[in-house]
Amino acid sequence: MWRGDGRSDRAVTPVLSTLFMIALALVVGIVVVVGALTFLPEDTEPRPRADFTIDRSSEAFRIVPQYMEDGTEFVLQIDGQDVYTWQGSGGREVRRLSCLVPGDELSIRSVHDGGGRTYLIERYTVEARTNCDLSGTATQFAYAKVGDREVPLRDQSFEFTLSIDPDGPNSVNGDTSYPTTNPWVYVQRFDRPVEGLEPPVYVVVFPDNVGDWDSSPSETDRARIADSVTVTASGDLQATPGGSEPTNDVYLVFQPGCEESTFQYVTKQASYENVILLNGEPLFTATGGSATYTGPGVTCTN
């Protein structure tokens, strides 16, 4: 008896099973690929086109926009802090930067989606200090200058104005006060304890009759101020005032705080009453020997 039909069924079954498995694998693969492509984030926005030149001289940096794509915002940053903004469709203003020290980082970023996405366009690390007509000759300035504008650096979490009002019987300035951004005032930030105050702290030397001087201090003047103050390895402030201006005035350490600020008044060799102010409010009058004072907190932006 012929039994070919049964043998034929058994031969066809493995072939059909193999084809079915191949087809199923193809369908699953297509579904996975399509699904993955569906859920990938869209990034159809091309990198903006821009070209900036960073020129360095002994005095300052010049940031020169050569080309900026229309409709795009470009932000200049110093140490991650926004200091100037160009609009691509607007002008191409050159920005002059001074009061920079080694380690400061300059960067230019394009901004999209209201600040939610940025592209790095240029980056430059400062290798040598520029000239500065602010804050003495510290290794790290408390401010930078962007054009004619003074921009506080480093302490991005604090906002405050520290100033002096000579207010003495020999003063010709009345109640005028002079902030730490005045070129005759010496400021240096320390990221280690000074006079028992925890960092960050500022060492400040205030000349009391600064308002009497019309000229800016020379490099020699700034060097004399810097040489008159030393912070030892143990954090002690040693003031060695000179016999003449501008190194015979008020020496103090300032520790900003959100709830309360602290001042360590070290010494002075000046005849004026020398009222110290924080954000325009009188705190204490520098008179005799050293003393510690507390004052209101400053604006904390974090």
Image: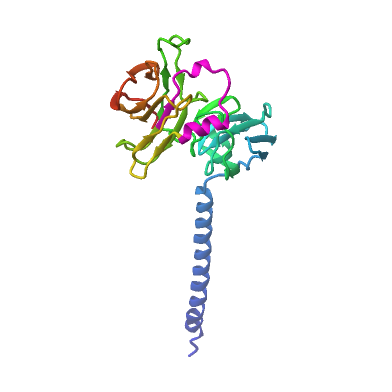
Q: Nearer the viewer, residue 115 or 284?
A: 284
Looking at the figure, which quarter contains the C terminus?
Answer: top left
Judge from the rendering whether residue 74 lies leftward or rightward of residue 174; answer left or right.
right
Judge from the rendering whether residue 48 lies leftward or rightward of residue 142; answer left or right.
right
Q: Tell which residue pokes out farthest to the right in this image.
A: 66
- Is residue 210 magenta-colored? yes
Q: Nearer the viewer, residue 84 or 38?
A: 84
Residue 78 in the image: above or below residue 27 = above
Residue 20 in the image: above or below residue 131 = below
Query: Which residue is at 49% across, 19% downward?
Result: 210
Residue 234 coordinates in the image, percent (x, y): 33, 44
Residue 259 coordinates in the image, percent (x, y): 30, 27
Judge from the rendering whether residue 26 lies leftward or rightward of residue 52; answer left or right.
left
Q: Nearer the viewer, residue 176 or 296?
A: 176
Residue 122 coordinates in the image, percent (x, y): 61, 42
- Is residue 104 magenta-colored? no
- Residue 13 visible, this orientation: yes
Q: Nearer the viewer, residue 133 or 214?
A: 214
Judge from the rendering whether residue 46 lies leftward or rightward of residue 290; answer left or right.
right
Q: Quadrant of residue 91?
A: top right
Query: Which residue is at 58% across, 43% downward?
Result: 128
Residue 2 coordinates in the image, percent (x, y): 50, 88
Residues drawn in magenta:
203-227
Query: Which residue is at 51% across, 39% downward?
Result: 79
Q: How is the image coloured?
A: rainbow
Q: Quadrant of residue 279?
A: top left
Query: Which residue is at 58% across, 41% downward?
Result: 119
- Residue 71 visible, this orientation: no
